[in-house]
Image (cartoon, rainbow, N blue to C red):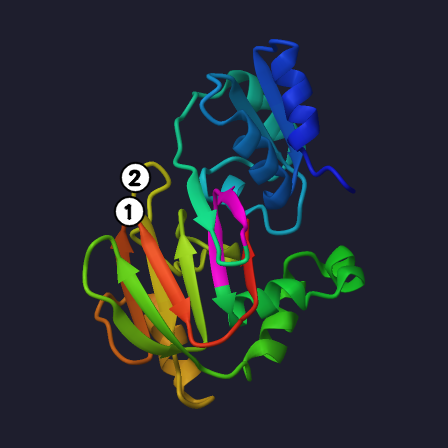
């Protein structure tokens, strides 16, 4: 538990292996890839978690036997690794998504026993509970542009675009384009979620006060007060 993959990956690199196979969820895969980044050693992914968003966005089968075929017979692919830094002194990386506000409440509020029984549907249950997360003032700066202010319930920075079930939260995101995609979700009332769901499913691109998407190589987010954060 105290080492989600960093130490094991360093041992594998020291042993000069040709391939590292990471079996686990997105958090485990992140730890392995963060340590092995720029080493030139390929990483094989065996999706053994609940969400497995990295595998799903890379079209790696979630069936372990089929995923193993990809590990040993698939095509190597270079992907982006995003750097994450916070005022709290965190300095790490992520492969999938980083979020603050309601998104983090969903991830941290999942009941582990329920997750074991029903899988990623447990995130839906947690999401319903998190719908009441209050809006928070944030300023978002993309690269060297002027900051843009929002009053958001959640902000998600994505290196990939699709959630479980193929939901296109950031439909234009590509894991190897050198860019990060941002979605700001800011409904004023509960009914505002209906139009957001419709826009996400229909892949509507127009920005408005309820949902806005941004893109850049460097994203700086400043919240008016401390808010929960998560990354994978």
The reply to whether residue 70 is visible in this rendering is no
Q: Is residue 48 above or below residue 11?
A: below
Q: Which mark is residue 178?
A: 2
What's the distance in space between the residues labelled 1 and 2, CA to CA?
Answer: 7 Å
Nearest to N terminus: mark 1 or mark 2: 2
Determine the main secondary structure of the stretch shown in magenta: strand
**Closer to the camera, 182 or 72?**
182
Q: Could you tell me which secondary element the residue under label 2 belongs to? A: loop
Q: Is residue 219 left or right of residue 64?
A: left
Q: Is residue 40 above or below residue 232?
A: above
The reply to whether residue 180 is visible in this rendering is yes
Q: Is residue 160 above or below residue 4?
A: below
Q: What residue sits right under mark 1 in the picture?
A: 217
Q: Position of residue 77 (x, y in %)?
A: 40, 26
**Closer to the camera, 219 or 180?**
219
- The residue sitting at 39% across, 67% down in the picture is 222
- The residue sitting at 51% across, 84% down in the picture is 134
């Amino acid at each position: 538990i105290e080492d989600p993959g960093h130490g094991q990956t360093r041992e594998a690199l020291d042993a000069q292996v040709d391939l590292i196979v990471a079996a686990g969820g997105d958090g485990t895969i992140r730890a392995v890839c963060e340590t092995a980044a720029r080493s030139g050693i390929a990483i094989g992914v065996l999706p053994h978690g609940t969400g497995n968003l990295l595998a799903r966005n890379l079209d790696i089968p979630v069936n372990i036997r089929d995923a193993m075929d990809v590990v040993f017979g698939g095509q190597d692919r270079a992907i982006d690794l995003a750097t994450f830094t916070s005022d709290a002194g965190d300095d790490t990386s992520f492969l999938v998504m980083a979020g603050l506000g309601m998104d983090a409440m969903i991830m941290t509020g999942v009941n582990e026993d329920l997750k074991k029984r029903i899988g990623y549907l447990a995130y839906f249950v947690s999401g319903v509970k998190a719908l009441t997360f209050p809006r928070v003032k944030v300023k978002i700066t993309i690269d060297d542009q002027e900051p843009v202010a929002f009053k958001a319930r959640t902000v998600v920075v994505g290196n990939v675009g699709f959630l479980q079930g193929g939901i296109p939260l950031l439909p234009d995101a590509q894991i190897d384009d050198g860019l990060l995609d941002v979605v700001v979700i800011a409904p004023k009332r509960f009914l505002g979620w209906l139009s957001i769901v419709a826009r996400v499913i229909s892949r509507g691109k127009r920005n408005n006060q309820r949902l806005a998407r941004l893109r850049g190589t460097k994203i700086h987010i400043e919240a008016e007060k401390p808010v929960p954060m998560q990354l994978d």
